[in-house]
Amino acid sequence: MLKVAQVLKSNGTDGGLLLSFFQIAPEDIDLQEPVFIEFDGLPVPFYFDSFVRRGNNRAIVHLTGVRSLKDADELAGAAVYADYFEEEEGEDLTGWTVLDESGATVGTVSGYEDIPGNPCIYVKTPGGEEVLLPLHQELVISMDQDARELTLTIPEGLL
């Protein structure tokens, strides 16, 4: 899962939340899919009841089950995660440039492997070799959709 937003604060008295998005733009969120908020170390799914964009990277949302100011206040400051790298999205990364943490080009995404619990991408290096890299949230530094660049922390020994 990818950390996609932060709950900034409650909004109104009916359970509304103000979210600030990063890593991906608000319009890239699939409103039919759940987002997850951690409780006691476990991801709990929430579905969107409403979603209204506010500026470039914010939205006022209502999540299923969050119906009061008290419920919303309990979520203030929480990180919001999404299963961003499902097969369809992973395949959409084909052609993207992969960079390491120093900004050096590693190669180009040539495919996606949906290994349960361990999604991976195939990257064709400038030398023509194809390597398999994990696509975990902890390893994703940034995603620039306009430039089609994915910056990853690449564990030692994988290249």
Image (cartoon, rainbow, N blue to C red):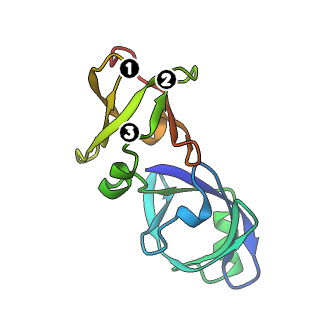
Q: Nearer the viewer, mark 1 or mark 2?
A: 1
Q: Which kind of residue does numbered mark 3 sit on?
A: Leu
| SS label for mark 3 | loop
Q: Position of residue 133 (x, y in %)?
A: 33, 30
> Nearer the N terminus, badge 1 or badge 2?
2
Which residue is at a point 53% across and 20% down the rendered structure image? Answer: 104
Q: Nearer the viewer, mark 1 or mark 3?
A: 1
> Where is 98 relative to 40, above or below?
above
Q: Which residue is nearer to you in this view: 107 or 134? A: 107
The answer to whether residue 31 is left or right of residue 94 is right
| SS label for mark 2 | strand
Neighbor class of circle 1 (other Cα within 10 Å; few <14, some 14-19, many 20+) is few
Q: Which residue is mark 2?
A: 105
Tell me the distance, in whole angstroms, between the alpha carbons under discs 1 and 3: 20 Å
Q: Which residue is mark 3?
A: 135
The answer to whether residue 71 is left or right of residue 91 is right
| SS label for mark 1 | loop
Q: CB atoms at circles 1 and 2 under 8 Å apart?
A: yes
> Where is 139 relative to 16, above or below?
above
Tell me the distance, in whole angstroms, between the alpha carbons under discs 1 and 2: 8 Å
Q: Which kind of residue does numbered mark 2 sit on?
A: Thr
Q: Position of residue 114 (x, y in %)?
A: 25, 47
Neighbor class of circle 2 (other Cα within 10 Å; few <14, some 14-19, many 20+) is some
Q: Which residue is mark 1?
A: 126
The tally of labels here is 3
Which residue is at a point 44% across and 63% down the rendered structure image? Answer: 44
Tell me the distance, in whole angstroms, between the alpha carbons under discs 2 and 3: 16 Å
